Image (cartoon, rainbow, N blue to C red):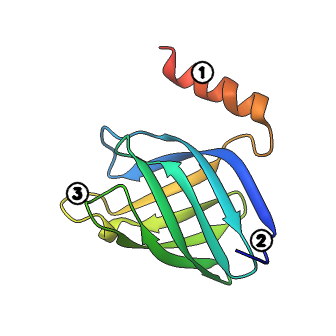
Amino acid sequence: MSNLKVSKYNFFVSKHEPPGNYNELHPCNIVRSKWREQGWYFNSFYRMSKFKGIVIGNVSFGLVTGYRKYRIPYIAYHYEGGFTMPAWMLPGTPLYFIRCTYAERNSWIGNIKLFWDKYRK
């Protein structure tokens, strides 16, 4: 991919509506150009997901793996510090939407501490 502008390893935390027994801490790598994005993350169902799509303004959409045996569509609305995704893309789950925020942005030490604190219990 040429024109890559941003590549970040980070963590984001998620809140699910309605709440349930979901993974809420997601290590991720997001690579974004002006209008393209791709990357990976550890998803809400404790599996690795890879995604690839396009970004238009504050909305991105494309295809993602890790939820079914095949790729499924995704859509996300991005805002300062996070994004929201409708959960209609996850057939068979009772979810309405997932709201995600980036954890201690740009700080690997802060992200590792957050990860450790979450999972050492």
Direction bottom: furthest residue: 56
- The location of residue 78, given as percent across then percent down, is 63, 69
Instruction: Indicate the amino acid at tag 1.
Output: Trp
Classify mark 2: helix, strand or loop.
loop
- Dot 3 corresponds to which residue? 93
Q: Residue at x 48, y 77 (%)?
A: 62
Instruction: Indicate the amino acid at tag 3.
Output: Thr
Disc assigned to residue 4: 2
Disc assigned to residue 23: none
- The location of residue 3, given as percent across then percent down, is 79, 77
Direction left: furthest residue: 92
For the N terminus, give its image quadrant. bottom right
Identify which residue, 101 or 44, lies in the foreground.
44
Identify which residue, 71 or 120, lies in the foreground.
71
- The location of residue 10, given as percent across then percent down, is 68, 45
Q: Residue at x 67, y 67 (%)?
A: 79
Front position among marks 2 and 1:
2
Q: Earlier in the sequence, mark 1 or mark 3?
A: 3
Q: Residue at x 46, y 66 (%)?
A: 85
Front position among marks 1 and 3:
1
